[in-house]
Image: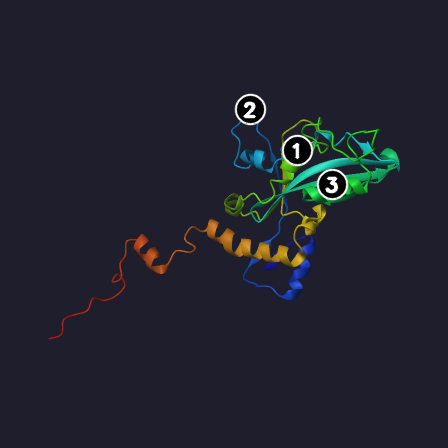
Amino acid sequence: MRIISKHQDYYDSALAFGHDERVVFERNVSEYRMTIKKDSYPTEYDFMIPTLGTRGVHNRWSSNYDSNRKGFEFAYHPFTVAFCGKIYSGIEIKYRKGGYMGEWTSSFAYDFDSYVSLLKKYGLKFTDDSINRKWSWNTNRKGSPKCEKEVKEYFGRTGEDHISFFADKGKPIAICEQDEGFSNDCTLRFNSALSDVAFYKVFDAYTTFQELDMFISGVMTREGNPMAGISDTDLRDKHGFDKMSFKKAPTKRR
């Protein structure tokens, strides 16, 4: 696979192992704002809000900062990656020191266990159990990263198959981020850098490159061209011809 792009990504390093010039990935970055307005009929992408949106876990609490004993301030940012037609749920944990003047640093989790490990690493606990001082969830915080049930369900979406939808649109990569506050609107960023959300935690560079190569050369081609995969015989019959249409009929010998 040959990549035409104005930006670099972590899986570009796999080009060193060789590539097929016939398969081309034009990695053009674009955005689409997913919103359902009352006065207009939603597009096909808008119908994907329940699928791509960070359902179950919302950005509404991202401005509700937590802190640990070392004086660090934390915020949580859920997002969804649609990669080669499949969904991967992620949560970014941002932390800084020094109040609003501090610079944010990020860590990323793509599964429940990794998320819990990060919380414990940073000394974050969601309930104040002064008796036993054990780390625990806040089960009353529904729809937040502090509620175990919602977080487990959120990461449980990983692997959902929407291959036909994204192949038909010609979009091998899409990163969905929900708006701040109580809005259900989302922004889709097509073909943006997967390294920005540490997607190498899901697939290494070589595997990511191979998945893209197979999706673009196989699935996207098949979905975009309904004739792909039809045999010559079926294609001939489809157009009303038969096996003698392009041949001269044999004559009887005298």
Of the numbered discs 3 and 2, the one sitting upstream in the chain is 2
Task: Kindly identify which residue carries mark 1.
Answer: 149
**Image point 70% across, 46% down: which residue?**
197
**Tag in front: 2 or 1:** 1
Q: Amino acid at mark 3?
A: Val
Of the numbered discs 1 and 3, the one sitting upstream in the chain is 3
Task: Kindly identify which residue carries mark 3.
Answer: 116
Extreme residue toward the top, this view? 38
Of residues 92 and 157, the one drawn nearer to the viewer in this rendering: 157
On residue 124, the disc is none
Of residues 196 and 140, the one drawn nearer to the viewer in this rendering: 140
**Image point 59% across, 58% down: which residue?**
210
Q: Amino acid at mark 2?
A: Lys
Extreme residue toward the left, this view? 254
Residue 76 vertical position relative to residue 244 in the rendered view, above or below: above
**Tag in front: 3 or 2:** 3
Image location (x, y in percent) of residue 14:
66, 61
Q: Amino acid at mark 1?
A: Lys
Alpha-carbon span between mark 3 and mark 2: 39 Å
Alpha-carbon span between mark 1 and mark 3: 13 Å
Task: Kindly identify which residue carries mark 2.
Answer: 38
Image location (x, y in percent) of residue 158:
61, 43
